[in-house]
Image (cartoon, rainbow, N blue to C red):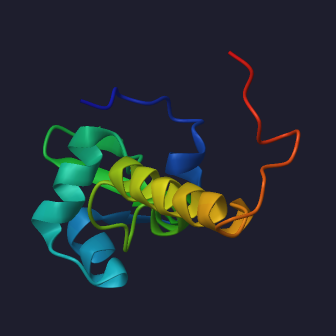
Amino acid sequence: MPKKREKDDPLYTTPRYTTAQVAQILGIDQKSVQSAIARGTLESALLSPRLRVVSQAAIDAYRARHLGQVGHPTRKKQRLTQKTEAATKVAEAPPAGEAPTDKERTYD
């Protein structure tokens, strides 16, 4: 849970929005905004026990980092890396019937 912030924090001095307003700005559900705040991916300030506010900078940062990212990025990256490596090996392999070069030879 995000901690309470001091009054001189930029979240208090810059334009700020409620979770409902942030949801409308980002085009997502209010529960999604609240979940992002709970996970810590969207920075917020606690003005009162029932009121959280989000700064414009935090909205922009969330939009750049997380909005539109669906799935498991590490798995996607891993599959892409494996496909790229496999394609590279195929492209670098000598044609059938040719002797391997010194770099490709292994000495056991």
Residue found at the very far right of the displayed protein: 102
Left or right of 51? Residue 72 is: right
Residue depicted at x 58% and y 52%: 13
Q: Position of residue 9 (x, y in %)?
A: 57, 38
**Image quadrant in which you'd find residue 22:** bottom left
Does residue 96 sit above or below 107 in this rendering? below
Left or right of 105? Residue 91 is: left
Q: Position of residue 103 (x, y in %)?
A: 85, 40
Residue depicted at x 73% and y 62%: 92
Residue depicted at x 44% and y 30%: 5
Does residue 19 sit above or below 2 in this rendering? below
Q: Nearer the viewer, residue 69 or 3?
A: 69
Left or right of 56? Residue 39 is: left
Left or right of 39? Residue 8 is: right
Q: Quadrant of the N terminus?
A: top left
Residue depicted at x 31% and y 43%: 47
Q: Nearer the viewer, residue 93 or 99?
A: 99
Residue found at the very far top of the displayed protein: 108
Q: Position of residue 46 (x, y in %)?
A: 30, 40
Q: Position of residue 72 (x, y in %)?
A: 29, 54
